[in-house]
């Protein structure tokens, strides 16, 4: 039985930071579910990362039928971590599978598009590029001046004469799309001041993507994720392009003025 929810400071598992303290917490949670799936008995609760830990995480994700998450990695505040925090008898693998069968059947036509724009030297904060997300034809964008939502047609028209950009279309469930939408709208209402590191366009997109379990930063470049959580547009493009959620990559070319 878990006493309260366990939190980790950085990702654990495949292509993750694997801080010993976080690894130990995930090992302990996996051990509590050992009777429900195979693969978790081949490592100790010692904070040492091994390939067996990745196998065990994958086994847990598969056993729980967590939608589109079988990559062997546990992200902070992710669905996998929330599931691990449940007691085995509460998690209810068979019931979970049935629930997620309904969820998965609802994702066939569900997608969001992450936009990564080229750099624009004349715009404050855009010297390294820009990032935004399209959810149901509404673009959520963190500009230097404000956080806003803009109709897709208007937004793309305004940007098509400025620079090239790439669209990464990702598969999501209707539930995940709702989570993303609510989080972006919360941030728009909050209107925290722009910060090139902690509250930039790309950092916001990365944080929201990772709230539904989509890896959006390269943990190898973040020695201390707690004190430095900035994500550049280039890093976002590279990491998300490798996601197993990727449906299509679209290159949008700048429209030449007549």
Image (tube, rainbow, N blue to C red):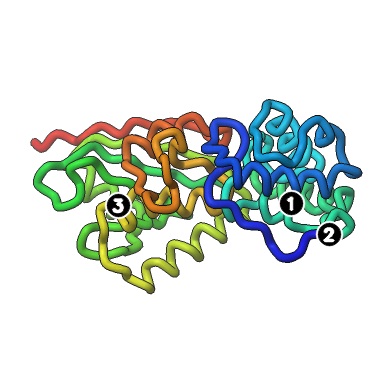
* Label 2: element kind: loop
Task: Report the front residue among 246 and 96.
Answer: 96
Judged from this view, the residue extending furthest toward the front is 46
Q: Earlier in the sequence, mark 3 or mark 1?
A: 1
Task: Report the front residue among 223 and 136.
Answer: 223
Q: Is residue 26 left or right of residue 252?
A: right
Report which residue position mark 1 lands on: 84
Q: Quadrant of the N terminus?
A: bottom right
Q: Earlier in the sequence, mark 2 or mark 1?
A: 2
Identity of the residue drawn at 35% across and 53% down: 152
Report which residue position mark 2 lands on: 1
Report which residue position mark 3 lands on: 197
Identity of the residue drawn at 53% across and 46% down: 10
Identity of the residue drawn at 54% across and 31% down: 15
> Disc 2 or disc 1, which is closer to the eye?
2
* Label 1: element kind: helix
Viewer can see residue 161: no
Q: Earlier in the sequence, mark 3 or mark 2?
A: 2
Judged from this view, the residue extending furthest toward the top is 51
**Quarter of image, res 59:** top right
């Amino acid at each position: 039985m878990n006493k309260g929810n366990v939190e980790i400071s950085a990702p654990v598992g495949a292509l993750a930071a694997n801080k010993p303290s976080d690894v130990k917490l995930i090992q302990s949670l996996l051990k509590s579910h050992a009777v429900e799936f195979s693969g978790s008995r081949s490592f100790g609760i010692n904070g040492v990362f091994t390939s067996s830990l990745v196998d065990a995480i994958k086994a847990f994700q598969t056993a729980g039928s967590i939608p589109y998450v079988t990559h062997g990695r546990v992200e902070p505040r992710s669905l996998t971590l929330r599931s691990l925090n449940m007691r085995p008898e509460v998690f209810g693998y068979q019931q979970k599978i049935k629930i997620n069968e309904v969820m998965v059947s609802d994702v066939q036509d569900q997608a969001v598009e992450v936009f990564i724009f080229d750099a624009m030297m004349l715009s404050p904060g855009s010297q390294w590029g820009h990032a935004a997300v399209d959810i149901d034809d509404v673009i959520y964008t963190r500009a230097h001046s404000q956080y806003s939502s803009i109709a897709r047609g208007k937004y793309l028209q305004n940007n098509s004469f400025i620079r090239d950009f790439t669209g990464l279309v990702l598969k999501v469930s209707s539930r995940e799309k709702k989570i993303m939408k609510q989080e972006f709208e919360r941030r728009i209402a909050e209107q925290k001041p722009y910060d090139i590191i902690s509250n930039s366009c790309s950092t916001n997109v990365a944080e929201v993507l990772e709230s539904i379990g989509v890896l959006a930063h390269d943990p190898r470049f973040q020695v201390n994720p707690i004190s430095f959580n900035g994500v550049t547009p280039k890093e976002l493009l590279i990491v998300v392009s490798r996601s197993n959620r990727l449906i299509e990559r679209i290159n949008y070319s700048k429209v030449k003025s007549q």
